[in-house]
Image (spheres, rainbow, N blue to C red):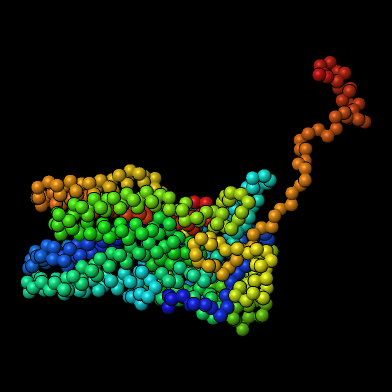
Amino acid sequence: MTTLPESTDRKLGLVIDLDTCVGCHACVISCKGWNTENYGAPLSDQSPYGADPSGTFLNRVHSYEVQPEDGLAQLIHFPKSCLHCEDAPCVTVCPTGASYKRTEDGIVLVNESDCIGCGLCAWSCPYGARELDAAEGVMKKCTLCVDRIYNDNLPEEDRMPACVRTCPAGARHFGDLGDPDSAVSQLVAERGGLDLMPEQGTRPVNKYLPPRPKDRIAAEPRALEPVVEEATGFLGWLDRALDRLPGGGD
Amino acid sequence: MHPARSVILFTTLSGLGFGLLIWLGLGLPTVTGWSAFAFFSVAYLLAGGGLIASTFHLGRPERGLKAFTQWRTSWLSREAWCSAATLLVMALYGAGLVFLEARWALLGWIGAALSLLTVFTTSMIYTQLRSVPRWHMALTPALFLSLALAGGALLAGQVGYAMPLLLLAGAIQIAHWLRGDGALARSGSTMNSATGLTGGPVRAFEPPHTGPNYLLHEMVHVVGRKHATRLRAIALVMMVLVPAGCLALPFSHSIAALAVLSHLLGILASRWLFFAEAEHVVGLYYGKR
């Protein structure tokens, strides 16, 4: 059913710390690994060992450079996956009802057996969170590892999205963003977590924590200037001795 | 956006086909027997051919009938309903004209209204996308509707209506281009809003992968924009000026055929630009537009 729920019981989502992410792409790999072997059609690759490899990914890490007016450029690694929006345009545009947003936890999912692969949901998403699998012809997207988070067969510490579980830097957090007392909501409040492209009116559930302001060195170091005008000791003697030779000194 | 051949053909051909059905439904011209058969054949070949072409871009066309289920929210589903209803109603109306020489006017008007509605639903599939600012404006349905009406009038031989409608469609087309050129800037989406990063200009330093991907292929098509200005001129001349000039000449079948052919090619050029020039905001994540 492509009508969006008025509200959801919980708002499960991710909080991604742009200050902490080191850009290692481990979340990309763990995501691809888990979601190729589990829920739904595998994430295919096209010509993976050829000259022009491409493939389906539910999570991709961009790197950006911010150049402040004064000061040094900053490099920010930026993981991006589905933001499980409250006003998800990808759901309402779907002609078949394959796309839906769950009432119980707000996760946006695709029922692949109903998907005709028209691609309109991917067009409607401003974030590029949906990719049509070239081998299966159906739309793939982040499931928030719905087959992990409720999976009683997994040890309790593994019942979180694969990307969160694998992140070596602790830059990814998972929880209920609808509960103001949850750890992720507290983190968002404390660090000023923000929405991507708020002007698109999608009301994303996932939040991004902006990089903390960098330390500044009070005075610029005097680089490339000689710190000793007159050499002393052995080098001083050598300097003077060479000056005395014909053609030396200037 | 990637200018997929199937979608360009679909919107062009079915736009003309449903445009012709509008005029046939209104009884302009009122034709019966074999000439009605000819008119309806052309309309159904265009409308149906376009619809069939549209299924070629589906990943799973065998499940296409499921597209009828979500008319409450989805413009694509509404389009499926409207086009099917139009083709059914107009088939009945056409059968009356062809086989019984009877014109059931009410049925024709309903069919004409449904044809117009079908074109409107097609245009809304694009207009609804806030992620493509160039499409997300009221001028988009105006362009599709005016072109369908003008092209339909041309095919139906309604010279008196075709001339002003062609000029109107041309004016709306120019407005759509000019207004569309600033649409991305007006949308407020920038690399800063996309990333939430502040403190200075943002530059895409490294893409996520060294190779291309579905998003870049589908949404960030920049190659087709190279000849945009020339293509705009070609589209306008062939779509509006040549047919309008032909209409001004005394009627002959060869000139009428030239007008229709030129109009068709002009719309194809315009539709190519409609897709190729449309910037999806996801391009901002890649430092492209």
Residue ID at (15%, 59%):
B156
Would you place residue A244 above or below residue B117 in this image?
above
The answer to whether B51 is drawn above or below residue B216 in the figure is: below
Q: Nearer the viewer, residue B156 or A46?
A: B156
Q: Is residue B223 left or right of residue A220?
A: left
Residue occupying image coordinates x 62% and y 67%: A15
Please give left or right for residue B29 compared with residue B88 in the image.
Answer: left
Horizontal and vertical percent for residue B232?
32, 47
- Image location of residue B43, percent across then percent down: 19, 64
In the foreground, A121 or A160: A121
Q: Is residue B277 left or right of residue A153?
A: left
Q: Quadrant of the N terminus of chain B?
A: bottom left
Q: Residue at x 39, y 45 (%)?
A: B226
* B78 to the left or right of A54: left
The extreme bottom residue here reads A152
> Is the residue A187 above or below the residue B69 in the image?
above
Q: Is residue B285 above or below residue A87?
A: above
In the picture, residue A243 is in which quadrant?
top right
